[in-house]
Structure formats: C-alpha cells, structure tokens
Amino acid sequence: MTALQCAVCATDDDFAQASLFLLEHMRDVHPSFSVLDTVTLAYHYIAEGSIVLVREGEEAVGLGAYYHGTREEAFNDKEIALIDLALAVRSHRGDPRISGRLRLYDSIDRGAASRGAGSTAVRAIRQQIPEPALREVRPALRRA
C-alpha cells in the first residue's frame, strides 16, 4: 500500500490536478452537478478558499476544500473554518488513512495560524468534542 500525501494546492499543476479530479467525480458531489457547476465550485475554492489534494503516488485519490471565514462577512471572520467538501475515490472511502481527517484539519490549523486567526474550531474537532459544541464549524450550504 502506497503512502498517502496530503498537501494544500499551491501551484498551477496542483490546481489543475484537483480541478480534473473534481470534474471526474462531480456526480459524487451531487448527481445533478453539471460541468459548469463543477468549474464554478473549483473557481471559488481556488479564489476564496483552499484545496487539500490527497495523492497516492502521483494519482489524486481525494480532496478536501475549506474556507477561512464566510462569504457573508467577506472572509474577514477568520476564526471560522468552514469545511465545504471532502471527496475520495470509491476504493478509498472508509479507508482509515483518509477518514482520519487530521491531515485536513492540521492544514486548516496551519493556514489559520499563518493568517493570524485562532483555530478554536480545529482544536475542538481534533479533541472529538460532540457536535453541538462545534459552533464555529457550520455545515456547508449546498448551492442548488
């Protein structure tokens, strides 16, 4: 079994690989997703959020997308981390290496620290605090 590598997309090649992965698996995001919906979603993640690409060797096997802050507050409320999407190829769903999620949360934590924001929500998730206590982490609103 090859080790998984998780990294926040930073280069054009990273964003291209993540976008192609998202396009390949757009029906797994939602059965009614079109190419335009998927490209728009990828654009928002690249322009306003962050994408964590999960690779096994050179192959993309998953991705996560998140925002620091909310669109309603023009992303100035950096104390909020909104995890918007987690997606894996079918063969890796339920794989403890992916479902552990700590790599994604650690990436968010480092991103929050680099932006001077607190990471209360990330620490709370890491400590497995029950859902009602996680007020900073709001469920993603699906765009219909």
Image (cartoon, rainbow, N blue to C red):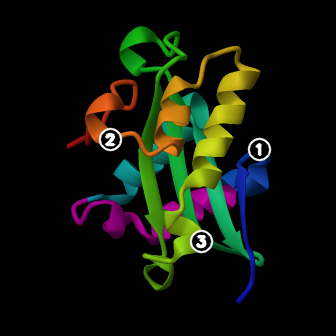
Give left or right: position of 83 versus 16: left
Q: Amino acid at mark 2?
A: Pro
Quadrant of image for the N terminus: bottom right
The mark closer to the camera, 2 or 1, is: 2
Which callout, 3 or 2, points to the residue nearer the camera?
2
Taking the magenta stretch, the answer to whether it contains residue 17 is yes
Task: Please tell me which of labels 2 and 1 falls first in the chain.
Answer: 1
* Alpha carbon distance from label 3 to label 2: 22 Å
Give the total of numbered labels: 3
Q: Earlier in the sequence, mark 1 or mark 3?
A: 1
Query: Badge 1 is on which residue?
Result: 10
Instruction: Give the residue pinned by disc 3.
Output: 97
Query: Which residue type does callout 1 highlight?
Result: Ala
The answer to whether 73 appears left or right of 76 in the picture is: left
Give residue 116's quadrant in the image. Answer: top right
6 vs 20, nearest the viewer: 6
What is the x, y in percent for residue 117?
63, 16
Above or below, 35 against 141 in this view is below
Q: Which image quarter is the C terminus in?
A: top left
- Stretch in magenta: 16-32
Reading the image, the residue beneath label 2 is 130
